[in-house]
Amino acid sequence: SVVPFNQQEKPGVLVLGQEYTEDKNIKLKKISNGKILTEIILLIITIWAIFLVVALISFHPSDPSWSQTTWNEPIKNLAGGIGAWSADILFSVFGILAYAIPLVMLLGCWNVFKDIDNQNCLDFFVLSLRLIGGLALIITSCALASLNIDDLPNFSSGGIIGSVFSNAILPWFNILGTTLALLCIWAVSFTLFTGWSWLMIAEKIGALVLATISLITNRTRRNNKRQTTEAYVSPHPAKLYDGTNVDYINPDDVLFLASPISQLAKEELSNNKNHELHGEKASTLMP
């Protein structure tokens, strides 16, 4: 029987003892409609957070907004009229914590996207914990800012939310007790919103501190070792003595004062010749 060409097995290539069969069929992973809708919502929230960052940075008090009106004044906000209104509302409601709202939105979108990517579905229980933690984090931060930070020129430091909650708790706990209670709620809400344990945060900070200390210590030891090596090694190489360049001779040293043998022989020969000459002169002078 003859096998059709399209049903024949494709030739394989032997790679490291295994047969590799070429497969050109690319399979696309199907994404559920719920996941697609969730990712679209997260993308919209991310773009809106970036828009709020631009509006808050370029906020100008003279722009027409929710808290004031102007006549025929050009809008100085880079995000336009909507940006001026949004920034004014955020500053009025949250105070100085308005700058942290876009960051909280981006961090929340990242946490939800990470949970969906790991579980391939949206866990509404985890999402509800994230929302509760985020709201509690914002409220307690505004209340702490209202208690401990001076007010801005145009707005309260903690906004309307911070003033309401701090004034509601102050009669019960006083200033110190209110601050401690808000700090405890803030720590719990931070864990709920981010999913990070404070023990893990302490371990990471400790590991970072130890790594920094070890890096500085190793660098100091390396520098000390290099300085010690340079102190023991002379920068100029030693030269052999050739007997021609002597800067100083100790007069008490007998070895340096002694004349060479060849010079002594020459002196003795010249002395003998002198004696012979004196002897010849003496013989000629005698009768």
Image (spheres, rainbow, N blue to C red):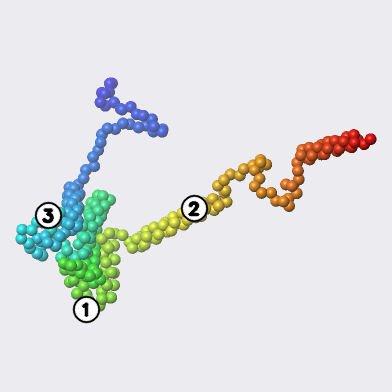
Residue pictured at 29% horizontal, 66% vertical: 187
> What residue type is disc 3 on?
Gly
- The tag on residue 80 is 3
The residue where tag 1 is placed is: 171
Q: Name above or below for residue 24 compared with residue 72.
A: above
* Marks 2 & 3, CB-CB < 8 Å contact: no
Q: Nearer the viewer, residue 37 or 81?
A: 81
Q: Nearer the viewer, residue 162 or 78?
A: 78
> What residue type is disc 1 on?
Pro
Q: Name above or below for residue 168 compared with residue 19.
A: below
Horizontal and vertical percent for residue 28? 23, 40
Q: Secondary structure at mark 3?
A: helix
Q: CA distance from mark 2 to mark 1?
A: 60 Å
Instruction: Quadrant for residue 107, please give it.
Output: bottom left
- The tag on residue 222 is 2
Q: Name above or below for residue 2 compared with residue 89.
A: above
Tag 3: Cα neighbours inside 10 Å, few (<14), some, or many (≥20)? some
| Horizontal side, residue 222 vs residue 198: left or right | right
Q: CA distance from mark 3 to mark 1?
A: 42 Å
Q: CA distance from mark 2 to mark 3?
A: 58 Å
> What residue type is disc 2 on?
Arg
Can residue 207 be seen here? The reply is no
Tag 2: Cα neighbours inside 10 Å, few (<14), some, or many (≥20)? few
Q: Quadrant of the N terminus?
A: top left
| Horizontal side, residue 82 vs residue 5: left or right | left
| Horizontal side, residue 240 vs residue 44: left or right | right
Horizontal and vertical percent for residue 14? 38, 30
Looking at the image, is mark 2 or mark 3 earlier in the sequence?
Answer: 3
Residue pictured at 44% horizontal, 56% vertical: 216
